Amino acid sequence: MALRRKSDRKRKRPSASSEAISVSEEAVQRAVDEGLLIARFAVVMDVKNHIIVTALRHDEPFDADVTAREVRQSLVRLATEQSDYADRVTDVLRERAARARGSVRHEHDYHPEDLASLDLRHAVYSRVAARLRLLADDVDYVAEIVETARQDAWADLGGAVEMRLDTLPTPPVRDADYARNRARRIRTLIDVDLAALKQQMDDI
């Protein structure tokens, strides 16, 4: 049996220096793009739900200016969260990883070999935060999110009513009272479904 050299049996551990390690610009940009997509989705969902709740719970009409302000606030809030994550990577996780020794005890037990990954995370968090702050001041970007959230909200409201209509049996006979009372029945149906949807939103 061939014997391996001692140096082959033991993995070389990276230097425990706390200095930043160079990370791939391509990897950073790819992660930033993904982070911005996730942030946009989160803002659209948050604003869409707020539109529905405002319409059902408070019986208030849609206001594009108010909604745009909410979008900007959501973007700034997410930017602040990303900045906090970046600070934690630098101030806590990276310093802890640089000094760590021994075996890894759990998934968040970072060691020197994790420094490159932590530097990547810091770069991504920092750039996403900066981009979100810029986007919060981008009138066109904010308006696009407002319109997307509005359309999604109306689609959810309309979908709830359509699903209810699809479950109703078709009346075999249409008499004079049917046409006369149709508007009232539809109004009642809509009220019931909107009340049910409102209850769902109250539970969120």
Image: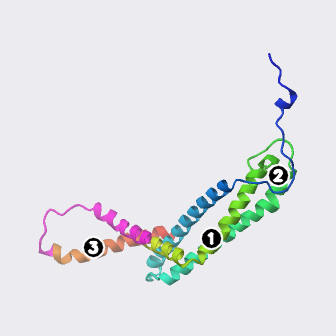
Callout 2 touching callout 3 (CB < 8 Å)? no
Q: Main secondary structure of the magenta part?
A: helix
Residue 20: name its quadrant. Answer: bottom right
Residue receiving disc 1: 132
Image: 87 above or below 67: above
Q: CA distance from mark 2 to mark 1?
A: 29 Å
Question: What is the three-letter code of the residue carrying label 3?
Answer: Ile
Left or right: where 2 falls relative to 82: right
Q: Position of residue 124 (x, y in %)?
A: 68, 60
Local secondary structure at mark 3:
helix
Q: Residue at x 43, y 68 (%)?
A: 152
Q: Residue at x 34, y 68 (%)?
A: 161
Q: Residues within 10 Å of mark 1 (few under 14, many from 20)?
A: many
Residue receiving disc 3: 186
| Residue 175 on the magenta segment | yes
Residue receiving disc 2: 97
Left or right: where 28 falls relative to 155: right
Q: Position of residue 187 (x, y in %)?
A: 29, 76
Left or right: where 201 falls relative to 102: left
Q: Residues within 10 Å of mark 2 (few under 14, many from 20)?
A: many
Say whether residue 203 is visible.
Answer: no
Question: What is the three-letter code of the residue carrying label 1?
Answer: Leu
Q: Residue at x 24, y 77 (%)?
A: 183
Q: Position of residue 36 (x, y in %)?
A: 59, 64
Going from N to C along the chain, the mark reached first, 1 or 3, is: 1
Image: 174 above or below 66: above
Query: Magenta segment, which residues?
Result: 151-177
